[in-house]
Amino acid sequence: MPRSGEDARRRLQQAALELYQERGFDQTTTAQIAARAGVNERTFFRHFPDKREVLFAGEADLRAALVQEVADAPDGLQPLDVLLCAFRKAGRILEDNRPFSEPRLEIIARTPALRERDLAKGASLTEALAQALRERDVPARLADLAAQTGWATFHHAAQAWIDDPSRKLDAHLLQAFDDLRALSATA
């Protein structure tokens, strides 16, 4: 069984998900995850700095994809429309990883330490989106507000997608941003 590379990384992620679901996050050790994945603990730490990061490993790829999509969005769009374009394209990452995304969200929701990490990662991602908008000459105040609002709307759509898998994430994103516009219009 390969002990390094992408195969080992995927096995470690799958093992962690299974153990977190069976035993809970706090009761699971990195040694148990490594053993379930068929690797040693050193291999675990080559891939992840700690057991929390197993659930957040794709965050850097998501951030890079979102920032790139903001940069590549057509000129002339309003900030929220730029973000919607970025979320729609980067949302494919989540759709491709649905078997991992769904249990991941459930584990995070019931584990305070993971909710805290999720909030920190979200804040970091929101700042990256705001910076990408500022680089498109969106004023800082509006870039920050759009990034925070857009990220919250993306999260809302992702949860709706988990709750209602009969519709694609893209449909939930479009609905959430339409709802946001409707809320703004009534304010």
Image (cartoon, rainbow, N blue to C red):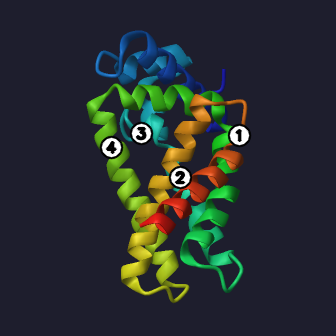
Q: Quadrant of residue 126?
A: bottom left
What's the residue type where badge 1 is placed?
Asp
Of the 4 image quadrants, the one containing the C terminus is bottom left
Of residues 95 and 17, the one nearer the viewer is: 95
What's the residue type where badge 3 is placed?
Glu
Q: Residue at x 68, y 40 (%)?
A: 95
Which of pointers 3 and 1 lies earlier in the amino acid sequence?
Answer: 3
Q: Is residue 8 in view? A: no
Q: Is residue 91 left or right of residue 132?
A: right
Observer-side mark, 2 or 4, equals: 2
Badge 2 is on which residue?
154
Q: Are marks 2 and 3 in contact (CB under 8 Å)?
A: no
Marks 4 and 3 sit apart, C-alpha to C-alpha, by 9 Å
Q: Residue at x 56, y 42 (%)?
A: 158
How far across and how far down the image is residue 47, in percent? 49, 39
Which of pointers 2 and 4 lies earlier in the amino acid sequence?
Answer: 4
Badge 3 is on which residue?
53
Q: Is residue 22 in view? A: yes
Instruction: Give SS at disc 1.
Output: helix
Marks 2 and 4 sit apart, C-alpha to C-alpha, by 18 Å
Q: Is residue 116 left or right of residue 122?
A: left
Which of pointers 4 and 1 lies earlier in the amino acid sequence?
Answer: 1
Instruction: Give SS at disc 2.
Output: helix
How far across and how far down the image is residue 185, in percent? 51, 68
Marks 4 and 1 sit apart, C-alpha to C-alpha, by 23 Å
Reply above or below: 136 against 7.
below
Which of pointers 1 and 2 lies earlier in the amino acid sequence?
Answer: 1
